[in-house]
Image (cartoon, helix red, strand yellow):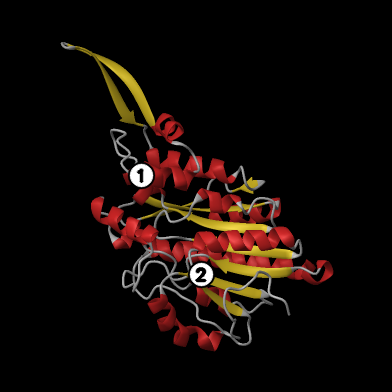
Amino acid sequence: MNKPYKEDSECRECLTISEPQSSWGGVWTEEKLDAFEKYVKAYLTIMNKYRDQYQWKLIYFDGFAGSGSRNVEALTEDNQVMMNLMEEHRISVEELAPYQGAAERVLNIKQRGFDYYYFVDIDKKSNEALEAKLKPLCNGKKIEFRHNNANDEVVNLANAMHHNNKLRSLVLLDPFGMQLDWTSIKKLKDTGTDLWILIPTGVIVNRLLDRRCKLTHIEKLTSFFGKDESFLKEYFYNTRVDKTLFGAVEVVEKVKEPIQKIAELYIQQMGTIFKHVTEKPLVLYNTRNTPIFHFACASNNSSAVKIAHEIINK
């Protein structure tokens, strides 16, 4: 059977899948996992009714299957930037905990599953550790690991779907920081993709939007949002003029409720790619009751987002 998109190396019947080995995360980690698992089951229930009739091939694509481990043998340049930002802004590893157990949950679903499973990550060590753990779950499934940059693989997936209108994909993108480039996500426009994406609103993004608009990492912000510097400054900052003994002084202040503004802007951007987006995504909080992530769904199918809303609001 032809594979849905071209391979860089020979595929094995059951290739390794990467997931973080650490015990990071807490209640919010389980909350997003539960929501996502419910959606996968609902997705398969619907798609299984029509896949044979329309000759669809279903793809499950996890763009950051093993992200989160700090015990990587060779950091990519982008991951190194994220690590440096974490240290610079004193962001704890726990705040950026990625999915744990997503692969196991998806592979354990008893329904008729996906035709192809793609797990993408750059960390070889965590992949090898997980191979033994997940090998019993393969059970003849067509599973492939892509040891590559997630942005490149999202583009590869999108190109394949543009060339084959029988492909349908459920995509999970949950980087531990801001590794996703907006230009990559844009490639999914006009494809049969349902996308779930974890937006690091209250952690790394909010910290990079410093209080006085210095924006020392503006290139990371523009790449993440797909907006230029002038737009971001106008969107996230207010300027006023204060009269002092020494004359008028211009004061730049960050907007109130910046985390909510970050989520709103990203949702707006998703709306330029997909016809339907969760207007009120799942908000995930840390132990201090501070919002740290927003978990959003987007699709060109209104029913998909309706289901996502129902899951989120339960």
Inspect this view and state whether residue 313 appears. Answer: no
- Say few, some or many: other residues with alpha carbon within 10 Å of mark 2 (under 14 / 14 to 19 / 20 or more): many
Marks 1 and 2, the one that precedes in the sequence: 2
Which of 162 and 115 lies nearest the eye of the viewer?
162
Inspect this view and state whether residue 221 appears. Answer: yes
Give the side of residue 41 with respect to residue 85, left or right. Answer: right
Residue furthest out toward the right: 53
- Percent x, y of residue 160: 68, 63
Q: Which residue lies at the image location 38% right of the left edge and 64% below the top edge?
A: 76
Which of 186 and 30 lies nearest the eye of the viewer?
186
- The picture quadrant where one finds residue 91 is bottom left
- Percent x, y of residue 224: 46, 47
- Percent x, y of residue 47: 73, 66
Q: Which mark is residue 296?
A: none
The amino acid at mark 2 is Val
Q: Which mark is residue 206?
A: 1
The amino acid at mark 1 is Asn
Q: How many numbered tags mark residues here?
A: 2
Residue furthest out toward the left: 245
Badge 1 marks a residue whose secondary structure is: helix
Badge 2 marks a residue whose secondary structure is: strand
- Percent x, y of residue 71: 31, 73
Which of 68 and 153 lies nearest the eye of the viewer?
153
Q: Which residue lies at the image location 38% right of the left edge and 37% below the top edge?
A: 257
Q: Which residue is tagged 2?
A: 120
Task: Quote the CA–CA distance across marks 1 and 2.
Answer: 27 Å
Give the side of residue 286 with respect to residue 195, left or right. Answer: left
Circles 1, 2 touching at the beta carbon (< 8 Å): no
**Screen quadrant of the C terminus:** bottom right
Q: Which residue lies at the image location 28% right of the left edge and 56% below the top edge?
A: 84
- Say few, some or many: other residues with alpha carbon within 10 Å of mark 1 (under 14 / 14 to 19 / 20 or more): some
Q: Is residue 140 above or below residue 78?
A: below
